[in-house]
Structure formats: structure tokens, C-alpha cells
């Protein structure tokens, strides 16, 4: 069988590597940051699958149950489109 994803409006913020205040406000300061050996700052996101890292350019999505997870920009662009408020 085939299934279609139900249309649902999500909230998300794109991590630029510098917008820690925006990410903290969006996630209620729920997550920390890790500076990699390459000097790139990443967001550490605790998910049901374990801790995941959001790299600069990745989106941080708030799920339908209030959970957060990272999403690569190419996947985000294929899956979501802007909604007018």
C-alpha cells in the first residue's frame, strides 16, 4: 500500500551556527552546543533515537508532540513549504 503524509503545519528554525539566542528561544534553552574539532558549533538535540547534532544550515523542527529533531536543508526543502500566517 501507499500512504500520503497528512498535511500538518510545523514550527522550525534554521541553525546558522551563530543564532544561539534564536535557537534558545525556540527550544526554551532545552539543548546545549558542542564545538567540534573543526571549530564548527553544533546544536546537541536529545531525541528518542539519542543525541543528534544539528550542523549549520540544518533546520531544527518542533514535532507535533513538542519534540525536537534536526533536518538537513535539502530534505526540509523537499518536505515543507512556507505557510502564510
Image (spheres, rainbow, N blue to C red):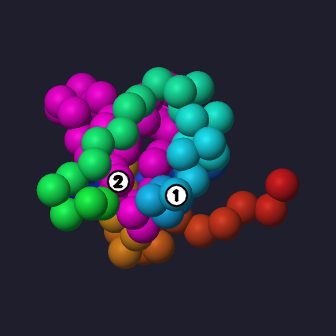
- Residue 11 horizontal/vertical position (percent): 60, 46
Residue at position x 62%, y 42% in the image: 21
Q: Residues within 10 Å of mark 2 (few under 14, many from 20)?
A: many
In the image, which residues are magenta? 41-69
Quarter of the image for the C terminus: give it.
Answer: bottom right
Q: Nearer the viewer, residue 52 or 74?
A: 52
Q: Is residue 34 left or right of residue 14?
A: left
Q: Is residue 18 visible?
A: yes
Q: Is residue 26 visible?
A: no
- Residue 15 horizontal/vertical position (percent): 48, 57
Q: Quadrant of residue 33?
A: top left
- Do tag 1 and tag 2 residues touch (Cβ < 8 Å)? yes
2 in magenta: no
Q: Is residue 76 left or right of residue 49?
A: right
Residue at position x 41%, y 30% in the image: 31
Mark nearer the N terminus (1 vs 2): 1
Q: Mark 2 = which residue?
A: 41
Q: Secondary structure at mark 1?
A: loop
Q: Quadrant of residue 58?
A: bottom left
- Residue 50 horizontal/vertical position (percent): 18, 30
Quote the CA–CA distance across marks 1 and 2: 8 Å
Q: Mark 1 = which residue?
A: 18
Quarter of the image for the N terminus: give it.
Answer: bottom left
Please tell me whether residue 55 is drawn above or below residue 78 in the rendered image. Answer: above
Q: Is residue 81 left or right of residue 43?
A: right
Q: Residues within 10 Å of mark 1 (few under 14, many from 20)?
A: few
Amino acid at each position: 500500500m501507499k500512504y500520503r503524509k497528512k498535511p500538518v503545519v510545523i514550527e522550525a528554525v534554521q541553525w546558522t551556527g551563530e543564532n544561539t539566542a534564536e535557537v534558545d528561544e525556540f527550544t526554551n534553552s532545552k539543548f546545549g552546543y558542542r564545538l567540534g574539532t573543526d571549530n564548527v558549533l553544533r546544536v546537541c538535540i536529545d531525541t528518542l533515537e539519542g543525541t543528534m547534532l544539528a550542523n549549520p544550515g540544518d533546520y531544527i523542527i518542533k514535532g507535533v508532540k513538542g519534540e525536537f529533531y534536526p533536518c538537513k536543508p535539502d530534505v526540509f526543502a523537499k518536505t515543507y513549504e512556507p505557510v502564510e500566517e
